Amino acid sequence: MDNAAQFLNYIDGQWVASTSGETFENRNPADQDDLLGRFQASTVEDARQAITAADHAFTAWRATPISQRAKVLNLAADYLMKNVEQFAEELTREEGKLLANSRDEIARSAQTLRFYAIEGQTITGETFPQDDAKMMVYTQREPLGVATIITPWNFPISIPARKIAPALITGNTVVFKPSSDAPLIGYRLAEALHHAGVPAGVFNFITGAASVIGEEITANPVVKAISFTGSTPAGERIHRVAAMSTRTQMELGGKNPLIVLDDADIATAVDLTVKGGFSLTGQACTGTSRVLIARGRKEEYLTRLVEKVKTLKIGNGMAEGTQIGPLATRQQLDSVLGYIEAGKQEATHVHGGEHLSEGDYAKGFYVAPAIFSDVTQEMRIAREEIFGPVVAVIEVDGYEDAIAKANDTPYGLSAALVTNDIAYIQRFPLDIQAGTVKVNRTTTGNLVNAPFGGLKQSSTSTFRESGRAGLDFFTQTKTVYIGR
């Protein structure tokens, strides 16, 4: 028997083992010999205990002074930053991203906690003028109740932070289930809140298979809010099983275009493609998946893009100089390799796409960044979310054609335009069907204090995440009439 650490659930203020008595492994995608630990294979009973604990804690937590709730978030942020080096290394070992990216993600998560500790204290209602001098009419914002937070493996602490922080500061209680492919850094966030003194039952953390506990934490009528980030099919399933009285927030997939017009600076376009399409090994919902380029600029663009990609160093995210790490799971590796083979059958394979499995790559899930050209709208690599380092290059005849092709997708998460033409810069936000719109910037990335979300099948909710908009989802408005 090895000496791998066993990590527990956190229910009603206690670290507890699952009632199943079973665990699952968490291994390094860069080196499968590296076992980070074992996590609880939770049962429906575990999930019910977490929901019950959150429900029982709700009345007291909503009555807790908001300054005390803010203190918990600030102390949790302090704990993350105090342990940033350890946690960043653990994040890289369990998810594969570069160590520098992991440090940034820990810091961003702490920043998010601190942002909501302040912003949550600015929530106000409204007063309404009316004709009755003996009556006052106003609104107040109130928490919803028990909130389920379900998050993916690609940003396994920053996405939870931007959901959990607004939920807690507004007086909701939380049941948090991280991805089973990256549960350790979610555990560290739970640990941070525990050390910050979050009251028993207010925050609960459980790990395990969605196929076992997913329906309980989404269909249970005690749950009043569900915030989920993941694939569109999974989001659709959650949306269907949720009770009518349960508010849902689903941030889902994308097929994000980078449009490169005739006047674009090609060096900028190449740089944005590499940052948006290949950094984070393409494992970002806002990643650049399609490049729609003016027909006359394609050859220059492809030549310079291939030259740039050839210089990228692929390897373990812990190693200095690495620019692209492994894919996060074997399932993701197999899926991406499948799309690369489909691309070779459909389009022109320009560069990359090899499964790297020899030498230093032998124990990990590595693939070389892939570039395809002569891609048309009906091809799989042009329509389906790949979630890997694969870029499909599509030729366009001017701005109108680019917009038509960019919008020809069921997704609408992020989109970017490369141009210096002020007319197109002004038109683009109106014409493109995406929730996040950028000009001369990569499709990836968003501010802590700005709203984030998608259109069409990239989101099932009118409620945005992040920024002040993140508070709106976790509160409801009550209108009060007082007469004398």
Image (cartoon, grey):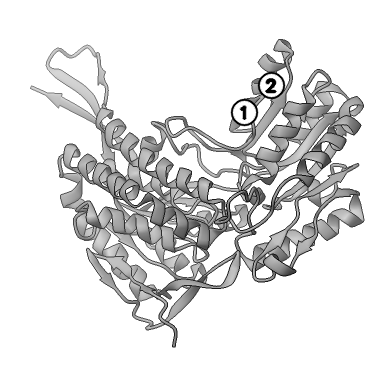
Quarter of the picture containing the C terminus is: top left
Q: Is residue 298 left or right of residue 50?
A: right
Nearer-N-terminus badge (1/2) = 2
Helix, strand or loop at mark 2: helix
> Closer to the camera, 266 or 9?
266
- Residue identified by numbered label 1: 437
> Closer to the camera, 443 or 383?
443
x and y percent of residue 12 in the render? 23, 64
> Closer to the camera, 399 or 374?
374
- Residue identified by numbered label 2: 428
Which residue does the image show at 87% across and 33% down from the upper left? 395
The amino acid beneath tag 1 is: Val
Q: How many residues crowd around disc 1 within 10 Å: few (fewer than 14), some, or many (20 or more)?
A: some
The amino acid beneath tag 2 is: Phe
Which residue does the image show at 69% across and 21% down from the upper left? 428
For marks 1 and 2, give the CA distance.
8 Å
- CB atoms at circles 1 and 2 under 8 Å apart? yes
Helix, strand or loop at mark 1: strand
Q: Is residue 387 left or right of residue 124?
A: right
Which numbered circle lies on residue 340? none
Quarter of the picture containing the N terminus is: bottom left
- From this viewpoint, which residue is outermost toward the bottom? 1
